[in-house]
Amino acid sequence: MLNFSGKKSVSTLYIVATPIGNLNDFSPRAVEILKEVAYIACEDTRTSGKLLKHFLINTQTFAFHQHNEHRKVDHLVNILDAGQNVALISDAGMPGISDPGFLAVRAAREAGHTISVIPGPDAATTALVASGLPSDRYCFEGFLPHKKGRQKKLGILAEEERTIILYESPNRLLKLLTELETYMGNDRLIAVARELTKTFEEVLKGTVAELKAEFESRDSIKGEIVVVISGNGYTE
């Protein structure tokens, strides 16, 4: 679409944070934007479909995830070039954090379009604050590599003086805690946050050895998990 000056119309890509558990955390502004845009790009259209249905949002959606992001980036920019606004959402939390959303932001900026972020829930900072560990200086590492580079990364993080935030899946939590024992010692203070903002929310704090023993004693470990690790040299 061209404006009267003959130049391409500038559209807006909205980056919209979605609830990490409790639907009441979804802001009225976020709902309004998702109803107004022409399209919503979703990490998983089935997961997002439940959220959109709950808030009576009928906007057309398309998939945008790590397996198709390069192909879909072009599609997204083409929509913006045509003068239509697009919103990008993830399954939970802020798009662009540990997902390919940054590719869409970069491409939209390079094409001359506006980026508008609608803030909201975020598992990393929610867990950080709940942990009671220092939050004035921290580093976010997301998911550690499963294989290549994992040991090197753990060695580097062992020397990090800032508070460290990691994401981990429930079936790999005990492996991570064992690795933290090896690289950071039994007495390093950590917090494990599970099911944040949900009915069975849990934030446990203690030494690596204490929390490893706690989770080893459980029949199963469920839920989305954030691990917050005190910086090297920190004591309480």
Image (cartoon, grey):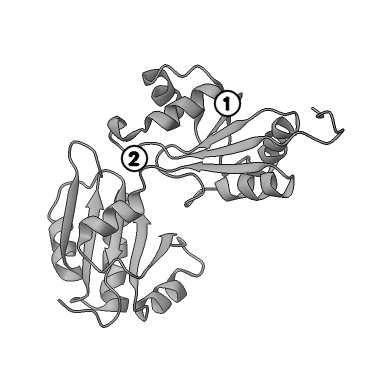
Q: Who is closer to the viewer here, 51 or 114? A: 114
- Say left or right for 224 vs 114: left
Give the amino acid at mark 1. Answer: Val
Q: Quadrant of residue 223?
A: top left
Q: Who is closer to the viewer here, 231 or 224? A: 231
Farthest-out residue, front: 5
Name the mark on residue 20.
2
- Say left or right for 20 vs 67: left
Which quadrant is the N terminus positioned in?
A: top right
Residue 143, can we see it?
no
CA neighbours of label 1 inside 10 A, class few (<14), some (14 to 19), many (20+): some
The residue shown at (44%, 72%) is: 153
Q: Quadrant of residue 196?
A: top left
Name the mark on residue 69.
none
CA neighbours of label 2 inside 10 A, class few (<14), some (14 to 19), many (20+): many
The residue shown at (55%, 37%) is: 14
Position of residue 222 measured from the top left corner of the image (x, y, whole percent): 25, 44
Give the amino acid at mark 2. Answer: Ile
- Residue 184 lies, with reference to residue 25, above or below; the image says below
Which quadrant is the C terminus positioned in?
A: bottom left
Tag in front: 2 or 1: 1
Q: Quadrant of residue 155?
A: bottom left
- Say left or right for 145 vs 80: left
Position of residue 47 measured from the top left corner of the image (x, y, whole percent): 43, 29
Mark 1: which secondary structure? loop
Gap in angstroms between the C-alphas marked 2 and 1: 22 Å
- Say left or right for 80 vs 186: right
The residue shown at (49%, 32%) is: 44
Q: Earlier in the sequence, mark 2 or mark 1?
A: 2
Position of residue 156 measured from the top left corner of the image (x, y, whole percent): 42, 78
Name the mark on residue 37.
1
